[in-house]
Amino acid sequence: MEITVKPHSISFLGLASFIFFFGCTSFDGCAQQVIDNLSLPEGFSVEIYASDVPDVRQMVLSNGGMVYAGSRDAGKIYAIADHDNDFQADTVYTIDEDLRLPSGVAYRGGSLYVGAVSRILRYDDIDERLEDPPEPVVVSDSYPSEGHHGWKFIAFGPDGKLYVPVGAPCNICDSDKEMYASITKMSADGSNREIIAHGVRNSVGFDWHPETGELWFTDNGRDWMGDNQPPCELNHLTEKGQHFGYPYKHGSGIWDPEFGEQGKDSGQTFRPPARELGPHVAPLGMIFYTGDLFPEEYQHDILIAEHGSWNRSEKVGYRITRVSLNGDKAGSYESFAEGWLQENDAVWGRPVDLLQLSDGSVLISDDHRGVIYRVTYNP
């Protein structure tokens, strides 16, 4: 299925949503209101890269420059094409639909990989098949089928392996199945799967340090311990098999009220987060910035999409944050782009994932609005 889009085009339902929230009469006007209310550091600007991408989640770039994206509840996989190379989308293709929570996408060797809860699917020669997508090959169908934290973020690492996290099937529980609350990796054909990290409640974003090749990942903290604890986390895996605390310990030193004593008696060493993030901010996608467009001080810093809280008495998150690094140590944690959360807890957007383009600009997906933004820098 193909949808041709013009700059700032949007579906009827999307436009109706914008009119309802903003009181404007066209997508151009509504989109401009969103853009005008976003705050970024001096010299940075943001524009709409693509619209009419309902429920857009993780993004990945093919070798040919095509942006692919998953969704969650929409059940669709998209290809977002910039045919004239002007860094603004021209066409949105639907590669597949009626899938179960196909949030995660990865690309390797001409093929698009999709994480859909219990299954990893592969679409071969995808760049050449946009108007006639191939039937998917099932790479693996042996991941847990629970929907709770079942949607995936997937990516190929520098070792050529496909990394697939498996969330906890609950808010807080101690499952007897080793695969839950873990990060796994496997060969591209689905073989040689192994667990590389334990105690990871729900990671929906990760990236590898451009120099060390080590894995860093976000993790969503548990709910119902109050507005201000526990923190969400940015974690750093330095050795295979490290345990990051869940469900026993949260953040750097908060023992769980239900499972904490069990953790203390276990003799297990729990690795603390590289950086505690805000409580309930729901950190999802993250990238190490490696482009030449942003100022030099951004080089190898981490940008995180904070999807935003859902059960806090006052909402937090709904922004892009920046974590600076000093070597392999996480330093400052500050807002980079905000404004999707307005007065009276009005939600104008929910960032999900980030993707760096060839010119060094950065895309941000927003599943609440079904749009993708593009951040540039011009001093």
Image: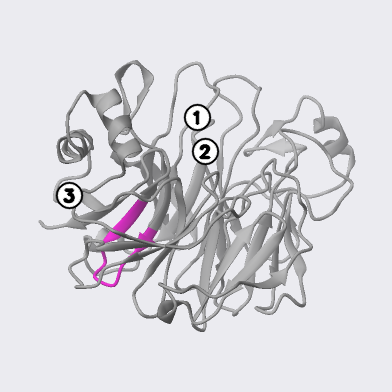
Badge 1 marks a residue whose secondary structure is loop
Badge 3 marks a residue whose secondary structure is strand
Q: Is residue 114 above or below residue 235?
A: below
Quarter of the image that includes the N terminus: bottom left
Quarter of the image that includes the C terminus: bottom left
Residue position marked by numbered label 2 in the rendering:
282
Residue position marked by numbered label 1 in the rendering:
309
* Gap between marks 3 and 1 measured at Cα: 25 Å
Seen from the viewer's position, the closer of residues 245 and 123 is 123
* Gap between marks 1 and 2 measured at Cα: 6 Å
- Location of residue 314 by image quarter: top left
At 41% from the left edge and 75% from the top edge, which residue is drawn?
62
Q: Residues within 10 Å of mark 1 (few under 14, many from 20)?
A: many
The disc label shown at residue 152, or none: none
The answer to whether marks 1 and 2 mark residues whose Cβ atoms lie closer than 8 Å is yes
Magenta stretch holds residue 363? yes
Q: Residues within 10 Å of mark 3 (few under 14, many from 20)?
A: some
Residue position marked by numbered label 3 in the rendering:
45
Seen from the viewer's position, the closer of residues 48 and 330 is 48
Residue range (magenta):
355-364
Seen from the viewer's position, the closer of residues 120 and 171 is 120
1 or 2: tag closer to the N-terminus? 2
Horizontal side of residue 196 vs 282, given as left or right:
right
